[in-house]
Image (tube, rainbow, N blue to C red):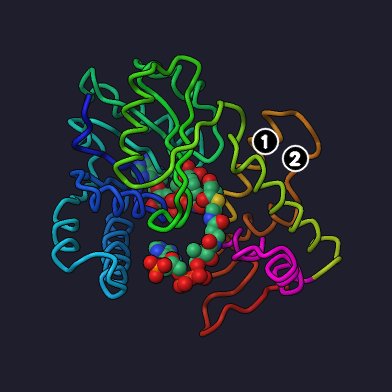
């Protein structure tokens, strides 16, 4: 089945990036969020990122206008019903995702492929509660979506071959690279990346280094483009903690114990860049370490 129309649920940092790349690749996109403010902010971000691509001569002004015209926004989830492919990119909480699927299902055509951009949650479990486990899978973009080359594709236990191939064709059309991962907690990228970030937070918690020295060490000592605490802020500390909890619960191993300092930052609402404060304070001209 050829995919032409795409519904994206959640207009946060991932949802806006997914809408951006899908529209540029020629798909009609319906972008949904519970908040009008989030939708307006997402459209402003998409325009800013497209503008930057025009100024760097990656795309033309015409391509920008056409891409923007392909995106519609809606606060009514059921408007996404007629889409060929749904990508759920709402907050990393299973109950939130579950409620979205429950509301959407009665409005979907029988052929619609349902996917989640979840960073960690079991695809098999999410799929088992729908009417279409064979047409359900993980479609996991990396942040920032317009820049990162990889998309992890995760089959649930029941995902059929046609569904996987249809999603792989979409990744090809985006000019990105699909990597197949088995459905175990946090899949491949986050199974490896998130314990490293969590260990960086322990390194801070135990006073081995401060925010600046930890980030500088990994940037200059291991050639990482961002330090682990800067990256955690970029991803969102709520998302990092949610992923660690899925690893800890799902693999039942204390080596995945989320650092109490990470929990404290999340409890304070210091969620990273999107909240204006995390391991760095972003409210001034330059980010300032908070420890
Ligand atoms: C949590 C999960 O489930 C999975 C994940 O996503 S894990 C996170 C994975 N992501 C990473 O690890 C990102 C690590 N960081 C990086 O790779 C780099 O710091 C970065 C690409 C984000 C920025 O790179 P940089 O060299 O510091 O910045 P800069 O030179 O300004 O930008 C490089 C390019 O990215 C673009 N860019 C930067 N930030 C962007 C953003 N937020 N949105 C869109 N485009 C962006 C720039 O326009 C520029 O594009 P061109 O090459 O076409 O000119
Ligand atoms: N951040 C990252 O680096 C990556 C994240 N992901 C995954 O992508 C998903 C989204 O993450 P991210 O974009 O960072 O999160 P954000 O917090 O930036 O955005 C989530 C958005 O979903 C909205 N939302 C919450 N509930 C609903 C709902 N019921 N219906 C529609 N929209 C809703 C939120 O609205 P409000 O703010 O009003 O609650 C918010 O606008 C998560 O599953 C995450 O694990 C995957 C790869 C990388």
Mark 1 closeness class: few <14, some 14–19, many ≥20 residues within 10 Å: many
Residue 247 badge: 1
Label 2 and label 1: CA atoms lie apart by 6 Å
* Range drawn in magenta: 210-235
Q: Which mark sits nearer the N-terminus, 2 or 1?
A: 1
x and y, in percent, of residue 203 in the image: 81, 60
Q: Is residue 104 above or below residue 206?
A: above
Quadrant of image for the N terminus: top left
Q: From the viewer's perspective, tell me whether residue 207 is left or right of residue 129.
A: right
Snapshot quadrant of residue 187: top right
Quadrant of image for the C terminus: bottom right
x and y, in percent, of residue 33 in the image: 31, 47
Mark 2 closeness class: few <14, some 14–19, many ≥20 residues within 10 Å: many
Name the residue that disc number 2 marks.
Answer: 256
Residue 270 badge: none
Q: How many marks?
A: 2
On whether residue 33 falls in the magenta region, the answer is no
Q: At 45% across and 42% down in the image, what residue appears? A: 151
Q: Is residue 275 visible?
A: no
Snapshot quadrant of residue 82: top left
Q: At 14% across and 57% down in the image, what residue appears? A: 66
Q: At 29% across and 62% down in the image, what residue appears? A: 46
CB atoms at circles 2 and 1 under 8 Å apart?
A: yes
On whether residue 213 falls in the magenta region, the answer is yes
x and y, in percent, of residue 216 in the image: 71, 72
Q: From the viewer's perspective, tell me whether residue 184 is left or right of residue 140.
A: right
Q: Secondary structure at mark 2?
A: helix
x and y, in percent, of residue 122 in the image: 54, 27
What predominant SS class does the magenta segment belong to? helix
Q: Is residue 98 visible?
A: yes
């Amino acid at each position: 089945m050829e995919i032409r129309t795409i519904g994206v649920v959640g207009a946060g940092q991932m949802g806006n990036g997914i809408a951006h790349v899908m529209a540029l690749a020629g798909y009609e996109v319906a972008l949904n969020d519970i908040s009008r403010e989030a939708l307006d902010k997402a459209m402003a971000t998409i325009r800013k990122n497209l503008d930057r691509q025009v100024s760097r001569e990656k795309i033309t002004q015409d391509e920008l206008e056409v891409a923007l015209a392909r995106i519609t926004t809606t606060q009514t989830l059921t408007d996404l019903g007629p889409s060929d492919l749904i990508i759920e990119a709402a907050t990393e909480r299973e109950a939130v995702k579950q409620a979205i699927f429950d509301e959407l299902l009665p409005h979907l055509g029988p052929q619609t492929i349902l996917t989640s951009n979840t960073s960690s949650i079991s695809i098999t479990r999410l799929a088992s509660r729908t009417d279409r486990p064979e047409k359900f899978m993980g479609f996991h973009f990396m942040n920032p979506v317009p820049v990162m080359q990889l998309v992890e594709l995760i089959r649930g236990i029941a995902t059929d071959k046609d569904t996987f191939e249809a999603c792989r064709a979409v990744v090809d059309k985006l000019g990105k690279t699909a990597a197949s991962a088995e459905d175990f907690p946090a899949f491949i990228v986050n199974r490896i990346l998130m314990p490293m970030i969590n260990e960086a937070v322990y390194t801070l918690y135990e006073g081995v280094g401060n925010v600046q020295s930890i980030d500088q060490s990994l940037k200059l000592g291991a050639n990482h483009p961002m330090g682990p605490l800067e990256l955690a802020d970029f991803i969102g500390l709520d998302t990092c903690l949610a992923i660690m909890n899925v690893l800890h619960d799902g693999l039942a191993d204390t080596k995945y114990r989320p650092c109490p300092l990470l929990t404290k930052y999340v409890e304070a609402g210091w969620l990273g860049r999107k909240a204006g404060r995390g391991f760095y304070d972003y409210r001034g001209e330059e980010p300032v370490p908070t420890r």
